Amino acid sequence: MSPAPHDVPPANATFRQRVRCFFGERLGLESLTALAAKKHVPIHRATVFYFLGGMALFLFGIQVITGILLALYYKPSPDQAFESVRAIMTEVDYGWLIRSIHSWSANLLIGVLLLHLLTTYIMRAYRRPREFTWITGVFLLGLFMAFGFSGYLLPWNQLAFFATRVGTGIMGAVPFVGHELLLFARGGENVTGDTLARFYAVHVVILPLAVFALLGLHLYLVQKHGMSIPPWAAAKVGGERNVPSMPFVPHFLLRDMVGWYIALGILAALAALFPWELGHKADPFGSAPQGIKPEWYFLAMFQTLKHLPQHVLGIEGETVGVLFFNFCGLVVLLIPFVDYRAAQGRPRHLLNLLATLVVVGFIVMTAWGLLEK
Amino acid sequence: MAELPESHSRRDWLLRGLEVIVAATVAVLLYPVARFLRPRKQMQSGALEVVAPFRLNQLKLQAQPPFDFDGKPCLVVCTPEGEVRAFNAVCTHLDCTVGFRADHGDIFCQCHLGVYDLHGRNVSGPPPRSLEAYKVTLRGDKDKPGQEEIIVSRTT
């Protein structure tokens, strides 16, 4: 087959044009550029919300790169884990930077994902036909929280050890299968070297594979359906067709990049000014030290469980709490079907009230947990 | 726009500037990564001598496996005449560790069938050079023959 006419560079083509033609002819880059040219981002009052997904993607990329780097020096065994992380912080060139960025970026990522979830809810972007985009997104948030939980143990320090004891202990409060879940998560009755090996495998093999698969589906769905336009933005100009938009490449991508630059600056500043602490090596038989707290995104749940009465309606408080959180998660997951007439524009007063309660509750409980000595 | 011939418009300069900034950012990010990848300094004793973990009579009774001498395996052999010699046991071919072969009375590398004699000289097979030889000193009581310690040291 002879090359298409546009694959042949004109006689006076510049070097750049020749290079582009060379690869275009062999790799079929037109289909990619055509796909990129098709993608448009609507412009309205909430356009800024569209940055959050790309920001999460960027932070995930940072996690992948810094995570691979850390894996080159980290040793997942109770005898060596703490020492190897200490060596990363003190002996390896720029190890403190890589580890601090990995930890800070993980926290920012969860924050960005929570905002992404909230703004998607506000824009009602989950309405038909984007239900699966929402569901894959909620599952991705769950996977990233699991990333945070499993990664927290790896330095094998006091805080991590007890946070894992408490976190896996909470699984034991699930009715009927709780104890089995606990054994499965810990790899035994106690948090031991087997737990560390399990968490390491989950953190560096299982979760990355699961995230890549689910993220691929999520991004495919975003491509397939295009950016959702909030109903109020469309109503204001008399229909989705009249909403102005900008091409994704290069207009929105360049704006994305500005955001990524800012994120990079924030990460570098946080890592340099507040390097992530290592703490003391875990002592499986020592008493829990003062101020045991999980990462901030688990703090609201931790705080709620701490202040629940021992028994609620004759059931153990822990169990009630765990069931409640699971119920909340399920409702969040199924919002597109709870609000099933969103596409017809039916108002969702009750859902908005509940969502406000959950968000306010989350903020209040988190703040309480942070401030409590 | 890209199809137009190069022009030095303001837009072109801005785009060129953007490319330079992105390239500089990538370089700035790659620098700590490259430094991170460089292996950290290994803690080595730098010892000039070491006492073998066996006594002379043990060596005469049975060939002893190599042991650590400043991070490298050290092979001590005893010739049929009763002379004790020590070598850096790293094969000069491709970094395998050689061993004493009792039935042939030579030093042998299993990886590529390299053969050295008991002076450490490469006799056959691929090794290009002799093994690095160490100095051996025996320290012990004349009244207790065979109980001598074997001290290996660098010849330099």
Image: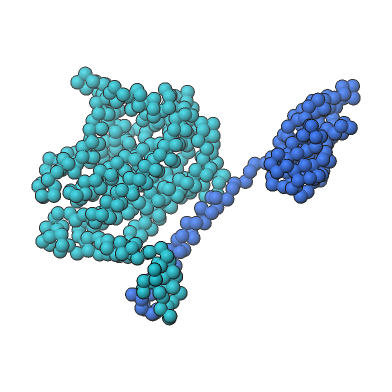
Chain colours: A cyan, B blue
Q: Nearer the viewer, residue A138 or A321?
A: A138
Q: Nearer the viewer, residue B38 or B82?
A: B82
Q: Point out residue A190 in the picture as x, y percentages from the top left corner.
A: 43, 24
Q: Point out residue A339 in the picture as x, y percentages from the top left corner.
A: 15, 43
Residue at horizontal 43%, vertical 27%?
Answer: A187
Q: Point out residue A288 in the picture as x, y percentages from the top left corner.
A: 42, 26
Left or right of A119? Residue B109 is right
Q: Pick out the residue farthest to the front.
A: A1
Residue at horizontal 41%, vertical 28%?
Answer: A186
Q: Point out residue A372 in the picture as x, y percentages from the top left corner.
A: 32, 33
Residue at horizontal 11%, vertical 43%?
Answer: A349
Q: Is residue A335 visible?
A: yes
* Residue B96, placed above or below residue A224: above
Q: Pick out the residue farthest to the top.
A: A314
Q: Is residue B55 visible?
A: no
Res A256 quadrant in image: bottom left
Residue at horizontal 33%, vertical 45%?
Answer: A214
